[in-house]
Image (cartoon, rainbow, N blue to C red):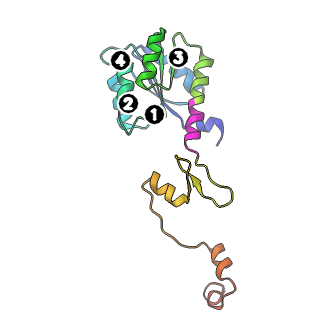
Amino acid sequence: MTETSIEQSFSILVVDDEPKNVQLLGNLLEENHYDIEFALNGPDCLEWLDNRPFDLVLLDIMMPGMTGYEVCETIKSDMAKQHIPVIFLTAKSETEDIVKGFDAGASDYITKPFKAPELLARVKKEVELKILRGLIPICANCKDVRDDEGAWGQIEAYIQEHSAALFSHGMCPKCMDQLYGDQDWYKKRFKTK
């Protein structure tokens, strides 16, 4: 998968009550091939997140009704959404504001006015982190996988623990040939033309 195709599949929800900021961010991120949606306030953001999965939320803090801090805390308290990284993008630049943002659950904090290359670099870092979160360490020899605690085990057990997938077992033609290729019953049943 190319970098551009990864970015195109990386969805960002931009949340800001200022239409000018929304337009500026939208143009910048769309020019860089990200999939973008917008919300103008906290409740709209939460509604979007209830209806569609996003890979990242860019969130203003100072919004009417529900602050960005409250929105972030709501996201992080929801088991279905807490994995979504939140980057605050705000004019609040005091140390206590930044600390409060991280305490609310933000993965990053950018102050306005922002510099486009810095914003894009931080978003790209979230793309890279998403890719890394999706990697499963697998042994090159025996194909066992390492779980979150560092223990090694069969891939079937790992997948069953981390998903709702079920397995059925069978044997591919290559393995059948390796195991039974010299058996008469196998030759008669599977190797006749």
Q: Secondary structure at mark 2?
A: helix
Residue underneath mark 2: 75
| Mark 2 / mark 1, whichever is N-terminal | 2
Q: Quadrant of the C terminus?
A: bottom right
Q: Residues within 10 Å of mark 2 (few under 14, many from 20)?
A: many
Residue type pointed to by label 1: Ile
State which quarter of the image contains the N terminus: top right
Which comes before the other along the chain, label 1 or label 3?
1
| Helix, strand or loop at mark 1 | loop
- Where residue 74 appears, as percent x and y from the top left, is 34, 28
- Residue 181's tag is none
Mark 4–mark 2 Cα distance, whole angstroms, equals 13 Å
Q: Main secondary structure of the magenta part?
A: helix
Residues in magenta, as a range = 126-135
Q: Are marks 2 and 1 in contact (CB under 8 Å)?
A: yes
Q: CA distance from mark 2 to mark 1?
A: 8 Å
Label 4 and label 3: CA atoms lie apart by 16 Å
Residue 118 position, x and y percent, is 61, 18
Is 145 magenta? The answer is no
Q: Which residue is mark 1?
A: 84
**Residue 130 drawn in magenta:** yes
Q: Which residue is mark 4?
A: 67
The structure residue drawn at horizontal position 57% and vertical position 33%, both measured from the top left corner, is 127
Q: Is residue 134 above or below residue 115?
A: below
Circles 1 and 4, Cβ within 8 Å, touching? The answer is: no
